[in-house]
Amino acid sequence: MSKLIGNAVFGQSGGPTSVINASAAGVFTEALRQTGVIEKVYGAANGIVGILNEKFYDIGQEDPAELELLKTTPSSALGSCRYKLADPDVDDTDYKRILEVFRKHNIRYFFYNGGNDSMDTCNKISKFMQKAGYDCRVMGVPKTVDNDLYGTDHCPGFASAAKYIATTCMEVYLDARVYDTGMITVIEIMGRNAGWLAASAALASYKGYGPDLIYLPEVDFDLEKMLRDVQRIYQKENKVIVAVSEGVKTREGKYIPELVGELRVDAFGHKQMGGTASVLADYLRDKIDCKVRAIEFSLMQRCAAHLASLTDVEEAFLAGQTAVRCAVDGMTDLMVGFQRPAEGPYQCEINLVPLSKVANTEKKVPREWINDEGNFVNKQFIDYALPLIQGESRIALKDGLPRFAKLKKVPVNG
Amino acid sequence: MSKLIGNAVFGQSGGPTSVINASAAGVFTEALRQTGVIEKVYGAANGIVGILNEKFYDIGQEDPAELELLKTTPSSALGSCRYKLADPDVDDTDYKRILEVFRKHNIRYFFYNGGNDSMDTCNKISKFMQKAGYDCRVMGVPKTVDNDLYGTDHCPGFASAAKYIATTCMEVYLDARVYDTGMITVIEIMGRNAGWLAASAALASYKGYGPDLIYLPEVDFDLEKMLRDVQRIYQKENKVIVAVSEGVKTREGKYIPELVGELRVDAFGHKQMGGTASVLADYLRDKIDCKVRAIEFSLMQRCAAHLASLTDVEEAFLAGQTAVRCAVDGMTDLMVGFQRPAEGPYQCEINLVPLSKVANTEKKVPREWINDEGNFVNKQFIDYALPLIQGESRIALKDGLPRFAKLKKVPVNG
C-alpha cells in the first residue's frame, strides 16, 4: 500500500456531547504524529459548512496541553452544524465545491464526527470522491448521546449522558421523598426516536434509587395506561417517579405535546408545544390530587462533562485515534464502530463498518429488553449499559471550576 | 458548669440540600463521642413532626461507616417537614407536647437543622423550655441553599448549590453556542426572596463561560428593560444567556408567572403559574425571532452531591459538631454561625448567634453588590462566593454510581 501524502481535515457535526471533543483530541494528536504522511491537520469550523466556506483552523499551531484538555471539555470546540447535503444525483453543487476545496488544500484525509445524518454526509462525500477519481480517505467517527447509530455496540457520548441521567435520578430520588406528603415526579429525558437515554434511568433504579416507571419511544404510549400505572404505585408508596423519553408517541403517532396542542396556550397566546414532562405532569395533577413536579434534564444531560464516564472519554478518544490510524493504513469509506465479546467481562473492540451500511439506519432499544407492560426495562439493558458508565473522568479544575480547553483557532489562509 | 446528663435528639427541617446530612454526620459522631454526658442519640423522623409524634431512630445502633457516608449523601436522611409551630402565647399545645416528649425520653439536648423558619421553631422551643424550667440545651444548626439566614456569613448548603450552578452554567454556555445560528437561553435558578443562588451564575461568567445578564429578586424586575438588555447583546453576539431568580418580582410586587397568569392556560384548561424561565422565554420568542430555550436547574441544584463543594461539606459537618460541643460545654439558645476575617485569605470562623436574633430575619444580597443597572452582580459577590466553592467532595462510588448512606433507622420504643 503506497503512502497517501497530504493534509487532513476533521469536522464535528450534529448535537454536542460531553465527549465529542475527546474524539477531536484523538484525531488531532494522532494526525499530528503522522509526520511525513499527514502534512497539515485542519479543523473545519461548523462541520461541513466550514468546508464549503473554506473556513479551517490550523491545529498544528495549537498548544498540545490545550488539545489534551479537549478530552474533558464538553460540547463542540470547532462548532457544529445541521446542514444536510442534497442527493448528489439530484444536485451535486455542494459535492463539486467540496472536491474543489479538497483539491485546493490537498485534503487527502477527511474525518467526520457525528451521528446518523453525519455518517450519511460522510458516505455521500466518500462515494463522490471515488467517482471523481480523487484519492481521499474518508473515515466516520461515531458520536451521539442518542446511541441510535447502526453498526456499533454503542456510541461515544451515550455513556456519559447515561451516567449523568442515572446519577441525577438517584439524587432527585432522595430529594423527592424528604417530606411525608404525596409526590409525583416526571422526568423528561432526551431521545426523539430511540429510548436508550430514558432507559438509562433504570441504572438508578437498579441501585435502589430510581424511577418506578420508564416509558420509551419503542413502545406506543398510552396516556390512560400510564395513569393506571402511576395510580397503582402512588396508592402503595405515596411517591412515584416517572422517567419519560421526550419522543414517546401514541399509537396514532402523536407526540405528547401534540396530543394536547389544541388546549395548551402559552403566556403570549401562542399554541405551545411544550415539554413532554410538563404536559404529563399537568395531566397527572388533574387526575391525582397531590404535588406533581416536572423536571427536564435539558441540555445538562449531554454537556455535563464534570460527570462523564471515563470509559466513554477513553473510547471517544480511541475512536478518533483509530480513524486516523486506519486511514493512514489505507482504509477508507468506513466508520469506526465498537463491539464487545459475546461472553465474559466487558471489553471495547474495534468494529469497522462500511459507511453505506451506517448511513440513515436507526438502532432502537430491542423490544425484548423492555418489559411486557412497556413501562420499564429488563436486566439485559442493565447488563448492556452498566459497563459503559464505569470510571470517573476527572476534569481539570481551576478555582474550583472547570478549566476548559482554549484553542487559538489560527485560520488557514484560503 | 455542672454536667447535664441525658439524651440528645437531632432533627432536619425545610428543603433539603447537598450537605444537610453532613451536618447530621457532625452532630451524630460528636454526640456519640460524648459518653457519660449524652447517653442516647436520637434522630427525629421528619423534624419537629417526629418529635410531636414521638418517632425517633436510635442512632447509636447505626454502623459508623454509614454515618460517615452521610457526608456525601444529599437530601434529608431522617426526613424533613415544613410544619410551623403556633405562637406559644396563642396556642401552646405543641410546646406542651414537646415538653412531655422531652421529659419522657429525658431529652436534654435538642439540635435542629434548618433555615429561617426552623430557627424560629428552635427559638420558640428554647424559650418555652426555659419558661417551663426544663433544663434542655437547644442549638440551631444552619442550613439553606438560599443563603438568606441572618447572623452567619454564609450558610451550609449554599456553596454546593453555587458550585453546581456555576459549573452547569459553564457547560451549558458551551453547549448553547455550537451552531452559528442565533440562540437565547433563559436559566431559572432557585431563590424566592434572596438572589444568592442566581448571583452564583456570575462565577461562570467570571471564568468566561457564563450568563450575560443576571436578574435577582433584590431589584424590581422590568420586563421591557430585560428585553432591551437582551436585544442589545443579541444584536452584537447572536447568543444571549440570561440567568433569572425564580423570585424576581415587578415593581408592583408580581412574580413573572403571575404577570401572565391570565393568559397562560395549561394542557388541561387550568390557569398555569408555570416557571419564570419558560414565561420569559415565551416572551422573548415573541419579540425576537430566534431559538429561545428555557432551562430550569430544578431540584438538581440542591441535591447534586456529586458536585458538592468540599469546603461546604466540611463546614456543614463542623456546624453540627460545634453545636454538640457548645451544648455539652453549657451553651444553649444559640445558632452556630460562620464569619470570615475582614482581610486576608478566607477562613471559616465560628460565630455563635442568639436564636432570637436569627429567627425570621432574611439576609439579602446587598444592593451595592449588584450593578447599577440591576442586571448583573459586582466583583464583591465573586470575592464573597469564590472561596466557598473550593475543593471537590469525592463521593463514595460503586459500579460507577453513588453509594449513599443506608441507615438502619432502628425505632426508639415510646
Image (spheres, coloured by chain):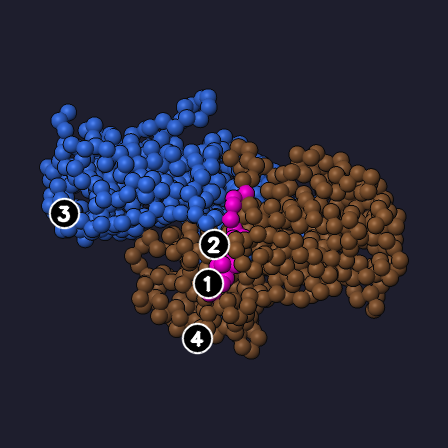
Chain colours: A blue, B brown
The answer for which chain carries disc 3 is A
Pointer 3 residue? A101
Residue sitting farthest toward the bottom: B252
The answer for which chain carries disc 2 is B
Q: Which amino acid, by three-letter code, is at mark 1?
A: Lys
The dominant secondary structure in magenta is helix
For this view, does B118 lie left or right of residue B167? right
Mark 1 or 3: in front is 1
Residue B183 image position (x, y, % from top left): 36, 60
Observer-nearest of A368 and B104 = B104
Residue B410 placement: quadrant: top right
Q: Which amino acid, by three-letter code, is at mark 2?
A: Ala
Q: Image point 19% across, 53% down: which residue?
A: A53
Pointer 2 residue? B166
- The alpha-carbon separation of the residues under discs 1 and 4 comes to 26 Å
Q: Mark 1 and mark 4 in contact? Answer it, CB < 8 Å.
A: no
Which comes sooner in the sequence, label 1 or label 4? 4
Residue A75 image position (x, y, % from top left): 36, 48
Q: Image point 32% across, 63% down: which residue?
A: B237
Q: Which amino acid, by three-letter code, is at mark 4?
A: Glu
Residue B135 image position (x, y, % from top left): 86, 53
Q: Image point 51% across, 35% down: which residue?
A: B400
Q: Quadrant of the N terminus of chain A?
A: top left
The answer for which chain carries disc 1 is B
For this view, does B67 lie left or right of residue A109? right
Q: Find residue B379 and name its label.
A: 1
